[in-house]
Amino acid sequence: MDKSSPPIDQRKPTDSQALSAVCRSCLHQFEAPQVARDIVCPNCGRNRIVAHPELAQLNIAHIDCDAFYASVEKRDNPELASKPVIIGGEHRGVVSTACYIARMNGVRSAMPMFKAKKLCPDAVIIRPRMTVYRDVGLQIREKFRSITPSVQPLSIDEAFLDLTGTQRLHGMAPAALLARLAGEIEQDIGVTVSVGLAPNKFLAKLASDMDKPRGFIVIGEADKLDILAKLPITRIYGIGAKSAQRLKKDGLTVIGQLQDMEEATLIRRYGEIGQRLFRLSRGIDTRHVSPNSKAKSVSSERTLNKDLADLPSLEDRLWSLSETVAADLKRKEMAGLTVTLKLKTSMHRIITRSRTLDSPTQLAETLFEVGSDLLKPLVDGTPYRLIGIGVSHFRPVTEADQPDLVEPTRTKRAQVERAMDSLRGRFGGSTIKKGRSMRPAPNPTGRRQ
Ligand code: TTP
Ligand code: MG
């Protein structure tokens, strides 16, 4: 057990503890006498109640739309309301999302479409309408911003909100404000959301996912350890299938096991990740909600000293830009699905080419590989004065750069890059060069940055 944790972490709600409660239907705020499952609102008699002993002290929220693309499709075509709906088919026949009716049959995001059809033969399959989803996502983001300026979008359908200080502004507790916001989004935009309220980002994100759809879960200091203990280790962000496998080999599968381990042991075994495992398993997360983080795209471009027309020179620049973008993504804990290459000709004509990947990335190697593929057909003697590379369509970082069974060399390169990142983390920045930077320069003038 973590002996150094403050005593509050060890406290659990008891039956005699009073609960602050909010009715999600009429927003009435009241004190419920004790921990009880079936509290009914004394004002409206309904039972959609959020209640928790620490309700008045919690300020960090995560809000995520329910089955986002599918919800938008159902909104726009009421005939679909009670039918199983699957969105997808664009990227080599993979499911983007499925409504909760289709999920009852086992359909999940990222599943091959043929398998989804087998599981749910009655499903209505719809191709994604990205521009519509993006517009709806932006409208929802504006709703978030109507209650606090401190909104940090994570992807098209989710964001963190810091509600510190909003009680005075809006005259109601964060929980009531969030309940009102969820109702408004449902009413005005026609999409339902799930809300998590907690002392920090990690716990808020876990909470929003615990009671979908139309959920509202609160995690406090006193119950966080118990709630975390039962969850699989993969719920810790950054622990993907590969890390989970490694931990499983060591007999570690649930977060509770990490809570029983010393920090030094975890760091000795797993390095930087070990420290994260230690802190997050105890619900400790000091990251701030940062409203200014670039959420739409992360990119880097460079105007060249002299115009370039040959592939090796352009690739040379592309590599260092890919490294810059990857470092930015890793620092911001973001990963994107779409890679965009930008070129400006000597005549100032801008050319962009994009490719959407099967799974999101934050790796320089992948950015470079895709960027270079997009670049090759454009190298036809045209002199270019600027080159840039960017990433957009952010997905949860936990889904990033999964081992690629089809292209094992990519997996291998990803491993090397991660190892380098970890060394950089321990010994500091620029002293360590990645594999590609150490290869011989592809042309006599090629200089790595
Ligand atoms: P999510 O919020 O992960 O999923 P969701 O909103 O569909 O469902 P949930 O109720 O579990 O939150 O992703 C938001 C949208 O992003 C989703 O509607 C479709 C898209 N998406 C993909 O295109 N591919 C994927 O693998 C995932 C996970 C999502
Ligand atoms: Mg969602």
Image (spheres, rainbow, N blue to C red):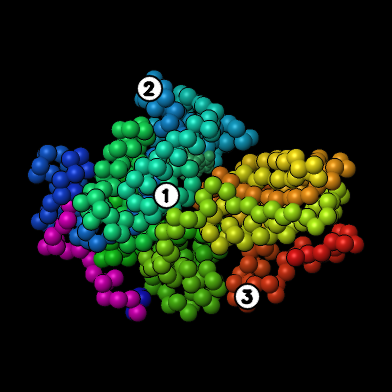
**Residue beneath label 1, please?**
159
Q: Are marks 3 and 1 in contact (CB under 8 Å)?
A: no
Magenta region, residue range: 4-21
Which amino acid type is marked by label 3?
Answer: Gly
Secondary structure under tag 1 reads: strand
- Labels 1 and 2: the sequence-earlier one: 2
Residue 439 appears in which quarter of the rendering?
bottom right
Look at the magenta stretch and give its main secondary structure. Answer: loop
Among all residues in the image, which is located at the extreme right?
444
Q: Which mark is residue 297?
A: none
- Labels 2 and 3: the sequence-earlier one: 2
Task: Look at the picture and state if 288 lies above or below 127.
Answer: below
Q: Mark 2, residues whose alpha carbon is within 10 Å: few (<14), some, or many (≥20)?
A: few
Residue at the location (64% across, 49% down)?
390
Secondary structure under tag 2 reads: helix
Residue 21 location (% of width, % of height):
17, 52
Which amino acid type is marked by label 2?
Answer: Pro
Q: CA distance from mark 2 to mark 3?
A: 56 Å
**Residue beneath label 3, please?**
428
Residue 42 appears in which quarter of the rendering?
top left
Residue at the location (46% across, 68% down)?
277
Residue 79 appears in which quarter of the rendering?
top left
Which amino acid type is marked by label 1?
Answer: Ala
Q: Are marks 2 and 3 in contact (CB under 8 Å)?
A: no
Taking the magenta stretch, the answer to whether it contains residue 19 is: yes
Q: How many marks?
A: 3
**Residue beneath label 2, please?**
78
